[in-house]
Amino acid sequence: MRLEETDRYLLSRHGRYLTAELRRPHRVLSTCRINGGLREDLTHIANHQSGEGVAHVVRKGHDLGSGLDAYHRAACAAGQLPPASTALMATAANMQCAVLARADHADLSVSVAATAGVLGNATRAGDPAGLHEHRDGSRPLGGEDGQDCPVQAAAAIAPPEAGAGTIVTLVFVNQPCTPACLVRAATLVTEGKSAAVLDLRMPSLQSGRLATGTGTDQLAIAAPLARADDWERHWAGSHNTLGELLGRATHEAVTRCLLLQNGVCAELRRTLCGALGRHGCDEPTLLELAHGELDAADANCFERNLLALVHDPLSAAAAYGLAEILDLTRTGVLHAEAAREAILNQAALLAAAVAVTPEHFGHFRALLQARQDLPPGRLAALAVVKGFERKWL
């Protein structure tokens, strides 16, 4: 299936492959471990699904046991791509969920073809790592003797991008760009991707903080080499139109991909647990406190109506307000003394929202103040339970 065709490239999807055939020489910057870095001799850029996201053992002949070079050749052969001149990226994402987004201004045009998944290994830049690279591959940190854990050869060689979540962006600029401009463009693409994940308030699975991407994200950016009368773009920062186009198209493509691949969108993130789950106010905690704090009949009613409770719009709004207070406290924007009172006030507001009785804010504040030593997420869950109880008194 042809997704985009220009005089510079043909972008198509076939099976598990999303492929750009370059019709004229391009300068390409990519994260690919084979044929990656900055190149001017590539004929193809491709993204392919190397396996399913969960519990998939790739069949013999397409696995990594014989090394990365052999895997690259086998994957290129399966996709009918020349291995010597192809930059190939791997993901567990479905190519049928790929999204093409475009942005234009005057003579500039940017196209971003993305695949994206965040439910398997979403991370935040600076999260504690779990692997350390050695000569023979990456190994898990923290063996019993303090040394990195030994691993099987295949696992040591295997690219982590074969895992369950990866955001891959293939970016095409229609005008020639200097090498430095492409490097700067990579930062704008990364910022656009991170902004899309942050806007959805996705949690990091390594730290519980807001995610900025996944641990295996990859990109490739291509711009045609200058011809006789061409001039090269030098600037791709956010003050220039090229930077704006890169960020806007990437944000649009990644946002749409997360809906198609993971079923994640702004409307479905509008939940109480979407806001506070990473802080400890999740469905199991809510149910535990309901059965501990309410009589049997009310606890049963709470449990059977939990879905409606966590999706209540006003309660979700109060929950996101509390999550923001907790995040700002963690970063030091709010100091501890002010945060303690703000958390209590917002938890009381959450309880009042659940109870649909804002006039009872003072009652809930006094009730929760007696339990203020609870961890914030648990205090929030208690507020929800007590709000539900008050709703039917």
Image (cartoon, helix red, strand yellow):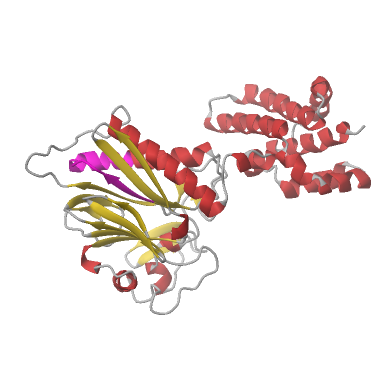
Q: Nearer the viewer, residue 230 or 343?
A: 230
Residue 373: x and y in percent read 74, 34
Q: Residue at x 33, y 69 (%)?
A: 79
Q: Is residue 145 left or right of residue 234?
A: right
Q: Is residue 21 left or right of residue 136?
A: left
Q: For the magenta stretch, what is the residue range? A: 169-187
Quadrant location of the N terminus in the rendered image? bottom left
Residue 96 seen anywhere in this rendered image of the structure: yes
Q: Nearer the viewer, residue 152 or 291?
A: 291
Residue 124: x and y in percent read 48, 44
Query: Does the segment drawn in magenta span residue 376?
Result: no
Residue 133: x and y in percent read 37, 60
Work out whether 291 lies above or below 346. Answer: below
Residue 352: x and y in percent read 79, 27
Quadrant location of the C terminus in the rendered image? top right
Query: Does the segment drawn in magenta span residue 177?
Result: yes
Q: Nearer the viewer, residue 7 or 268?
A: 7
